[in-house]
Amino acid sequence: MRIHFPLLASTAAIVLMAGSPPFSAHASATEHAAMLDGKHVAFLVGEGVHDGETFMPMAYLVNRGATVTIIGVQAGTVNAYNSDFEIRIQKSIGEVNVDQFDALVIPGGRSPAFLREHEEVVDFVRDFFASGKPVAGICHGPQVLVTAGVLDGFRTTGVSGISDELRQAGASYVDEPLVRDRNLITSRVPGDLPVFSRAIAASLAAGEAPAR
């Protein structure tokens, strides 16, 4: 039996798991909730996505006031490869544009290998990266960036299984929990999710919201 979570239910279900340390031990819950108010984040997912790499950073950002939209090849549901969770894609790539969002997150699992086969997805990711706004990928997520041809000269990480692929794309691969290089944020595995989530939130908090 598969478990279907619409966006809000999914976020609520994982909220306790996303309780990594806040930016400041002295900040109030109200300050945390308003930290990312007005920020809009796209999560790019496809069939075979990793559930925790989607829900945990999503909940972390929503808890701090961000609005999240799950995008993919087409609206509907996709299945996580590592659990019975189904994730609802709210908007297809054809229904969104770069200007609608302040950051893009690409979870890992088997999803990136699926997504990179779709030209419209790769074009969207390439355009988003060129905008200079934060782009974050974890685990196999950077595979979509490889196909988009944007990693040449960037320092990056990812799951060790794609290290050669990243180097061949011109990136400098390092085995570290978190790597930030200009607008690129990358991490390796689910154990890196706390630092990954905080880095996305910090980039959003420091940036200017794009015109819509």
Image: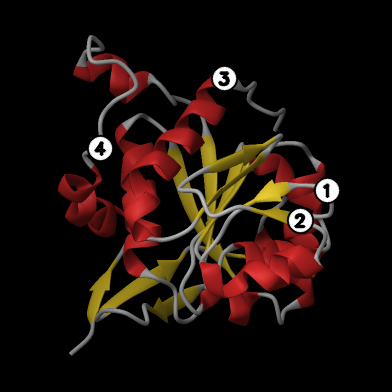
Residue 52, how many percent across, how many down?
Answer: 32, 62
Give left or right: position of 172 versus 39.
Answer: right
24 or 77: which is nearer to us?
24
3 or 1: mark nearer the eye: 1
Most foreground residue, 122 or 166: 166
Amino acid carrying mark 3 in the image: Ala
Mark 3–mark 4 Cα distance, whole angstroms, equals 20 Å
Nearest to N terminus: mark 1 or mark 4: 4
Q: Residue beneath label 2, please?
A: 171
Disc 1 versus disc 4: nearer the observer = 1
Q: Along the line of sight, which residue is nearer the eye, 10 or 160?
A: 160
Q: Which residue is denoted by mark 3 in the rendering? A: 206
Confirm or deny contact between disc 3 and disc 1 (CB under 8 A). no
Q: Earlier in the sequence, mark 2 or mark 1?
A: 1
Residue 167 in the image: above or below residue 211: below
Left or right: residue 54 compared with residue 167: left
The residue sitting at 57% across, 43% down in the picture is: 179
Which residue position is annotated with label 1?
A: 153
Residue 120 shows up from this direction: yes
Kindly identify the amino acid type of the residue bearing the numbered disc 2. Answer: Ala
Which label number is shown at residue 20?
4
Residue 48, image x, y percentages: 45, 81
Distance of label 2 from label 1 (alpha carbons): 5 Å
- Give the crowd class for mark 4: few <14, some 14-19, many >=20 residues within 10 Å: some
Residue type at mark 4 is Ser
| Nearer mark to the viewer, of 2 and 4 | 2
Measure the alpha-carbon separation of dots 2 and 4: 29 Å
The CA span between labels 3 and 1 is: 24 Å
